[in-house]
Amino acid sequence: MLKPLPLQNIRITDPFFAGRIETARNTAIPYMWAALNDSIPGVAPSGCISNFEIAAGLKEGSHVGYVFQDSDLWKWIEGVAYSLATHPDAELEARADAAIELAAKAQLPDGYLNTYYTINGLDRRFTNLRDNHELYVAGHMFEAAAAYYEATGKRKLVDMSCRVAECIMKHIGPEEDKKHGYPGHEEIELGLARLYGVTGETKYLALAKYFLDARGTEPHYFDVEAKARGEKPGRDWRRHPLVKYAYHQAHKPVREQTEAAGHAVRQGYLLAGMTEVGALTGDMTLVQAADTVFDNIREKQMYITGGVGATHDGESFSFNYDLPPERCYTETCASISLIMTAARLNRVHPDGKYGDIVEKALYNGILSGVSLDGTKYFYVNPLEVWPERCERRQDMDVDPERLGWFGCACCPPNVLRTLTGLGSYIYAADDSTLLVDQYIASEATAKMNGAKVTLTTDARMPWDGQVSVRIQADKPAGFTLMLRVPTWAKNFSMTIDGQVAEPVVENGYIVLNRLFGAETVVALEFPMEVRFMSASLHTPNYAGKTALMRGPLVYCLEEKDNGPQLWNLSVKPGTAEARFDESLLCGVTAITADGLRDEMESGLYTESVPGRNAVPLTFVPYYAWGNRGKGEMAVWLRRA
Amino acid sequence: MLKPLPLQNIRITDPFFAGRIETARNTAIPYMWAALNDSIPGVAPSGCISNFEIAAGLKEGSHVGYVFQDSDLWKWIEGVAYSLATHPDAELEARADAAIELAAKAQLPDGYLNTYYTINGLDRRFTNLRDNHELYVAGHMFEAAAAYYEATGKRKLVDMSCRVAECIMKHIGPEEDKKHGYPGHEEIELGLARLYGVTGETKYLALAKYFLDARGTEPHYFDVEAKARGEKPGRDWRRHPLVKYAYHQAHKPVREQTEAAGHAVRQGYLLAGMTEVGALTGDMTLVQAADTVFDNIREKQMYITGGVGATHDGESFSFNYDLPPERCYTETCASISLIMTAARLNRVHPDGKYGDIVEKALYNGILSGVSLDGTKYFYVNPLEVWPERCERRQDMDVDPERLGWFGCACCPPNVLRTLTGLGSYIYAADDSTLLVDQYIASEATAKMNGAKVTLTTDARMPWDGQVSVRIQADKPAGFTLMLRVPTWAKNFSMTIDGQVAEPVVENGYIVLNRLFGAETVVALEFPMEVRFMSASLHTPNYAGKTALMRGPLVYCLEEKDNGPQLWNLSVKPGTAEARFDESLLCGVTAITADGLRDEMESGLYTESVPGRNAVPLTFVPYYAWGNRGKGEMAVWLRRA
């Protein structure tokens, strides 16, 4: 399996992302720290740090927030670690060290660390793995520990994590005398794999594999523990596509699951964990199973923005081709879990289709989750908004405006760690193969067959398709350079050291297998026309409609630019013009196109036919919507 | 106020309805009786009769079903009474008498009669008027009593009802020492008005007016009684358009309510009650307030089928122009409550707009509630069905198939009483004015200024627009005959005694003010072209779409005739042909039109544009959908 290049070896210079990462570093990190400390007026209290102080015996009080509240600190530390890896910051590091010290005080002698149970009663720990997130929280702790160690060389959080893992292994596992359980919310599988990565201890990998192998087998552990709690087993998921524990992806053994189901973030973390653990243990049946479900998502259950989760009931996948734009869930975290999966599958067997999903979700469904100033967040990322409907229909669960923080604050730190850890999505390598997956301007170094190779990627995505990659080796080195060809880039052109070259494309990658010397410059030009997309006729949601894309970006109409009642607008395909506007939404390429607006004064129902007046339409990138006050938005509109 | 002609004076000969009424009489009446007696295998148990037997002390057991279960018997008796009025049936009457005898045994010495509280604890009676339907059940009892007395001359149920009313007045009313309450589910207002009608006791009318006057005033009675129960007042209606008791139309005094809100059936019964009580007491402010809300429904909150209630949350109205076709509630009972309101408003101040709503709801959104064989029912009447979505999305509450019976069986008996009482919607009159509102073939007699007038209406609605009304007076009589002109009938023609006549149309009625002699024949021809309807551009739900209508009927596409994925179909306006098919759906006029079907093989998202192949489309009347197995259905489709 290929590995991402270490973050320390990557300096992101990208005009599009560098500023966002800086905002994350300078705004989101301190903002979230303040939120975790309940010092932001007017936003839902987190209680996170306070819970640790109470659990550590430093103060009196009761636990605040969800059973998984601790994970917000762990995700913050993970995000901070990625930032420190590329931008050392003694003050920030000291703050993180102090938080780790505080957490250490809350860890119990047997290694257990979860403030919810420490405060509310240890007798109930490990009695409800289905609902109570203990293993999920541990998983985020392990990820934070590995990231922080890799960034700072400090082992303390790793050591604390090992003791947590030992505690879990004392209670849960395949052995006769242990609980044969697994998490109701997947995540620890990834965390254990990373803990294995920084310790070399295979027992952590074995535990992760056990959680995957045990999942959904009979007798069903969630029923076993429910009975032990004196509750009746099973669960009523009414019209849920796959009844009984599909919400937890535990309706059948993971190798028998073929369609995405249940809570979308859990599904994504499961697939990422299956891929990682499968590859590390050499069990390719896990990877194949992950691939099958990933393809189901990509081909039948994904929004054009890379959003996933078509219903707010259970924050879940719905069923094939059911993709309503106005009442999707498409949680920011779910898209993040999707790219975590895609990137891992790609490292196992590189294919351009994976990088395409990373690109699609990154530039659309994930970035839409955070405001341009980096301080407000969407939990849900709808593709169509009529504010009155969001606010007045009780069967809607879509906020028409970004909020500062959430009682359940999973998305903000998830976006943080994605942005500060962005480098890990750009390149991947082993000794003899080097992948360039995302054309994000950056400088990086890699060891290829003993040579030190410096990569300089120059790009102006998502606005411009001209890309160059400079490869400089300190001594001649033979290896395979693979450059991803975005599926949206038809008839692209390539030059090598200024000479037009005929690309060899395999599995969506330009493959250059050659001896690299002092300097090689590969220049690529990916044409960026505006594309009028259609949806499969199997989905009822977009019949007769089109969505505009340019390069990796999905575009949308906003009331601010096009007036109210966007549903009365239609667009003439082929009329689009793209123009970069420095002053609009922090600088975006907007698209103008010829449109028609239905016009008619009538009663509720009439024999009259609406007239259609020509109007200019202005489309802005979907990721930037909702930054100019509350109003209507639509990604899909009728073809005129 | 005009009155409907007595049912005894009307004999319905209509080819469309006579068979349906006979089915109701021969199938629905015995079927429902069996259901009330829990003797239908495989359908939800009613417990209704059993509850009365327990309350009467005839057997042991506990109450089954809802707090309003008794009302199913009262509605059955009301429906039976209307049937007996026109079709005497000694055996059926004996069965109804026996049921009344049983109920009499369950009535308490103080007049109280409600099996739920008699069985579960009288100490709690009248402590939760908001939720527990005691007054609603009494209202249905009063309506049944009046209907049964008018049909059979038997007073027993009227006497029982008066004792129930006295009991209520002992506990509830404006006086200092009484509870200043009113029903959470309106209905008793109508019942009391009818009880006044058969007894002449104005105190019943006064109580009805009290309930209307007290409604929504401060201090809010629902809070007062909630506090008395030790519960916290108020209620969380989250995104509900009008918070705090709008569900019960108690968010403000009834005269200040301007938009339909809350539970749709309750809203309808309230408006009907306001109209009836306002007219009988001469308080026109009540009628005006009812008119205001009725117009809001007609102009902004009604489906094209006459369905009302755009959300299943609270079985409620949503907000202006929010009319989703796939997730409406449009309960059959709600449309019935709408025509009850329309007919009453029309009797106060006749206007064709009222009869139009009666016609629209009757031929579409109400008839769709019952299967062609009269034994299966829709509670919810959607305008678009994708069965997979109904079954697999948890945020849907739409059954794709009719069911035999419901635990909450309000709709079936409501349809029964509407069909057996259909005559009351056809004609209305006072001494000097005679209205013909619905062109349903029938013979009727009326006393007009001392003369006996026989009316013979010949019509073949909804298939044919040719209508004749024969008026025969036993002695010359001057009066005003008013014949409704359907809004769908443009440039109709009229002859009187064979001579072409120029109609005088006022408020949607042809007005004939003249001396009627031995025989006058008014012949009308209402043209019936297929109409391609549009919806107001204020609603986002039907942009670019059309719905076909012919005469009073709304049409739909079914998968059975047009194949799956109806969303890929569009229709060419102006291409429609109508043809009566005796063999289709018990005989309907089907519409064929030229259509296009989008065709494309593609992945989930593509730059390809669907091809469009010409296909013939077959539309069937909406009321008849869902009688040929489970499948897709759509009323609105794209204009080609």
Image (cartoon, coloured by chain):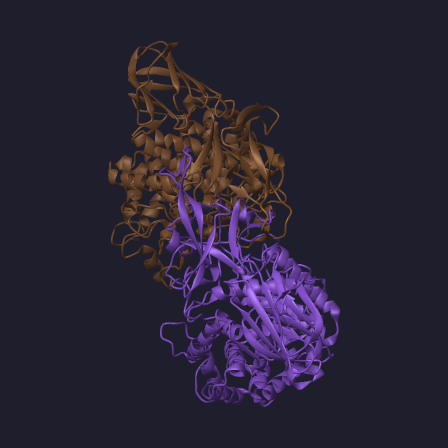
Chain colours: A brown, B purple
The spot of residue B386 in percent (x, y) is 42, 53
Q: Using the image as rendered, state which of residue A259 and residue B515 is in the foreground.
A: B515
For residue A118, above or below residue B183: above
Report the front residue among B488 and A9. B488
The percent position of residue B532, horizontal first and vertical second, equals 53, 50
User: Can you give x and y, in whole percent of width and height, for residue A40 in the image?
Assistant: 61, 41
Q: Residue at x 44, y 87 (%)?
A: B59
- Above or below, A298 relative to A222: above
**On screen, residue B520 above or below A525:** below
Q: Is residue B241 visible?
A: no
User: Between B113 and A78, which is closer to the camera in this rendering?
Assistant: B113
Specify whether B444 is left or right of A354. Answer: right
Q: Quadrant of residue B518?
A: bottom right
The quadrant the N terminus of chain B occupies is bottom right
Q: Nearer the viewer, residue B529 or B198?
A: B529
Q: Position of residue A640 (x, y in %)?
A: 52, 36
